[in-house]
Image (cartoon, rainbow, N blue to C red):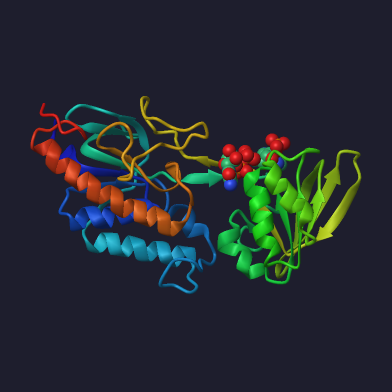
Amino acid sequence: MHSDNIYDIIIVGGGPGGLSAGIYAMRAAMKTVLIENGAPGGQMAINKAIENYPGFIDVNGFELSEKFLEHAKWYGLEILQQEAAAIEPGIEFHSVRLANGITLNGYTIILAPGGLSRTLGVPGEVENLGRGVSYCATCDGFFFRGKPVAVVGGGDTALEEALYLSNIASEVHLIHRRSEFRAGRILQQRIGMDPKINVNLDTVVTNINSNANGVSSVAIKNGQGSEKELHVEGIFIFIGFSANNRLVPKGIKMNANGYVLTDEKCESNICGIFAIGDLREKYANQIVVAAADGCISALAAARAVEMRKAGFTACKMQRR
Ligand code: NAP
């Protein structure tokens, strides 16, 4: 095994979690590499305005990503612009096989590949991302104070976010494709009691229309084929979110929704393999939480590296 390919910590994913893990790993003097095949920042980079990252009243997602990257590079973090193809757990080392055929070995691996919101796939959705189309009410709801918005989806998230937005927007048109909600009964009752929420069941969005200022309306169609246009300035789409768990190796425990189960150190059930940010089961998927996960996992990984180098195999601290 070539020693160049042996790292203390291998981080897979360069969003806020991965970059924050990189900063903490370098500060702990760990030999660390971060693998990212896209642009650094992940989903954070495509947010037009971020208003809930502490210390920044309003920051462009791309600019915040650049700051994370600059910070990590300042500590000398090695960043490999490559696609990770597979993760293999091992006894002494865990390994990451890259798409170019090279294998890297790490005493520890931090998985930070993020997640993705499902998209509707209707005309106007991609074009108006950040111009009225949003997948995050906490991030963007504030921009629609006193304005009409649409919410799409019938699950717990859509109903919770519709209730959140009804405190901000002038009115909320909740649009769901079936004639009954998937969400829990209590949420449905609260939706029914909210005078600012108009429910459109058995209805789909067919088009998102816009003008120079951004989204101006959505075209909807119900099960009887009747079509109409709703004047809205924002459309929030909550039709499910999936963790990017493609690389999670067999044997790592996930919940029914595909999120990795971790302990308080962000460590999975396989010692030395950590899962952070949107990949791990937790209460809130936010940039600040991913960054905090990066810190926790890197500090814990640094400790695990010391233990592994001292000949202890695992969390239970049994000598090899
Ligand atoms: P979800 O439960 O999977 O619901 C997704 C919703 O989007 C469903 O109503 C689905 O419609 C609809 N949908 C899916 N694809 C669509 C498409 N192409 N076009 C239109 N509509 C589409 O997702 P979620 O609401 O994000 O919740 C994820 C998990 O987290 C769930 O287990 C949920 O219970 C949990 N959660 C819990 C809480 C809470 O307990 N407070 C809060 C949030 C989330 P159909 O119903 O017709 O399939």
Residue nearer the viewer, 247 or 306? 306
Q: Is residue 179 left or right of residue 285?
A: right
Classify residue 245 as left or right of residue 75. Answer: right
For image coordinates 21% across by 61% down, the residue present is 75
Along the viewing direction, whichever of 42 and 20 lies nearer the viewer: 20
**Residue 124 position (above or below residue 142):** above
Question: Which quadrant is home to the N terminus?
Answer: top left
Residue 218, percent from left and from top: 78, 55
Q: Which residue lies furthest to the left in this view?
A: 310
Q: In this view, does 254 lie to the left or right of 109?
A: right
Q: Where is residue 239 in the image (x, y as percent from the top left)?
A: 65, 44
Q: Is residue 16 visible?
A: no
Query: Is 136 situated above or below 118?
Result: below
Between residues 22 and 163, which one lies in front from this camera angle? Answer: 163
- Check the picture and name the quadrant holding the C terminus: top left
Does 55 sit above or below residue 199? below
Instruction: Tell me residue 89's x, y (percent).
Output: 27, 28
Q: Quadrant of ligand 1?
A: top right
Residue 24: give x, y in percent of width and height.
Answer: 25, 56
Residue 141 visible within the image: yes
- Please tell me in which quadrant of the rendered image residue 265 appears: top left
Could you say which quadrant of the image residue 281 lies in?
top left
In the rendered image, the residue lying farthest to the bottom is 57
Q: Looking at the image, which is closer to me, 78 or 313? A: 313
Identify which residue is drawn at 44% across, 72% down. Answer: 56
**Count of marks placed on residues:** 0
